[in-house]
Image (cartoon, rainbow, N blue to C red):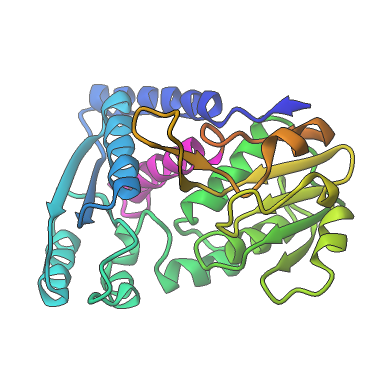
């Protein structure tokens, strides 16, 4: 069993981006600027946004964190339009989830597709399906980069993606089925109504768990030598931790890991790669806009 160390791989990418920023500085061209909007006080969202800000600092990007304890949908839409028209901002995200009184789809639709570095806008998702230049959703793109940089063969492999969200499962299934590297998988997109799920997962060469249920994937669901990617990050109570909680993945790591050829840890697997992909998209936003 070998750990797929997303933290180490993401650090490699950050160094490459840092060097690209240094070149831009030497050439007198603009340094990328990433902005993030955070509404409310969700602990997980705050941790994630702070990690993005820290990554910007390490790479040399400019960054802005815009926080609201509470805000109306109308006011948030106005802020999104303001960032769309701000030439200093090259890309921005609105951290999800949002409070229940705000329509997340309406906010996502309002973001300029050329600044949508999360890759959630329907225009970017549509271009992704057609394999046209666009911002790829950060988590799926990070997973593919992790597979590629660790020389994991995907061509001809049977892959099961558990979870069909528009953010991870659906786009990842499309990207893995493409005629590309990584890619050329035969992909099953499984979900809560999939029949014989256990058997389907047990036959897979590559298992990607993105269902948001801690310890959902157990050892009897995974065949010997499988590659297992755990996207789950659920906070669970843990009295042994200083903050009283721990992050749990969708895979029961201790019992599944011995059967795997490769497996991602939680934390330190997919999460850092998601942030690295966001940084790649932010630099690419300038290229797509000819800056």
For the point 55% across and 59% down, which residue is it?
A: 168
Corner quadrant of residue 266: top right
Q: Residue furthest front?
A: 239
Residue 182 horizontal/vertical position (percent): 71, 46
Give the vertical position of 218 relative to 116 (above or below): above
Q: Position of residue 245 (x, y in %)?
A: 41, 39
Decide whether residue 73 is among the magenta residues.
Answer: no
Question: Between residues 5 and 192, which one lies in front from this camera angle?
Answer: 192
Count of marks overlaid on the render: 0
Could you tell me residue 10's position as x and y percent? 49, 30
The residue shown at (26%, 33%) is 61
Describe residue 150's horizontal placement relative to residue 291 as left or right: right
Residue 39 seen in the current view: yes
Magenta part of the chain: 270-291
Residue 30 visible in the shown view: no
In depth, the one of 177 and 288 nearer the eye is: 177
Secondary structure that dominates the magenta span: helix
Q: Is residue 36 left or right of residue 126?
A: left
* Magenta span includes 273: yes
């Amino acid at each position: 069993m070998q750990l797929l160390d997303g933290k180490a791989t993401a650090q490699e990418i950050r160094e490459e981006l840092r060097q690209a920023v240094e070149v831009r500085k030497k050439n007198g061209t603009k340094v990328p600027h990433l902005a993030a909007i955070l509404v409310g006080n969700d602990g997980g969202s705050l941790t994630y946004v702070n990690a993005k800000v820290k990554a910007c600092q390490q790479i040399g990007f400019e960054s802005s964190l815009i926080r609201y304890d509470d805000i109306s949908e109308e006011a948030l839409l106005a802020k999104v339009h303001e960032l769309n028209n701000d030439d200093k901002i090259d890309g921005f995200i609105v951290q999800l989830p949002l409070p229940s009184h705000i329509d997340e789809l309406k906010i996502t639709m309002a973001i300029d597709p050329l600044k949508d570095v999360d890759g959630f806008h329907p225009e970017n998702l549509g271009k992704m399906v057609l394999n046209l230049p666009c911002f790829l959703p950060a988590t799926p793109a990070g997973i593919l980069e992790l597979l590629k940089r660790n020389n994991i063969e995907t061509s001809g492999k049977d892959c099961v993606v558990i979870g069909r969200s528009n953010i991870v499962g659906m786009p990842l299934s499309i990207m893995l089925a493409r005629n590309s590297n990584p890619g050329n998988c035969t992909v099953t997109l499984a979900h809560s109504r999939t029949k014989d799920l256990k058997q389907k997962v047990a036959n897979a060469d590559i298992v990607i768990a993105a269902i948001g249920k801690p310890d959902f994937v157990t050892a009897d669901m995974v065949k010997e030598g499988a590659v297992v990617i755990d996207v789950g990050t659920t906070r669970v109570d843990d009295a042994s931790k200083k903050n009283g909680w721990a992050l749990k993945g969708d895979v029961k790591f201790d019992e599944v890991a011995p059967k795997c050829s490769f497996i991602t840890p939680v934390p330190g697997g997919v999460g850092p790669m998601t942030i690295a992909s966001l940084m790649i998209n932010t630099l690419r936003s300038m290229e797509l806009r000819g800056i």
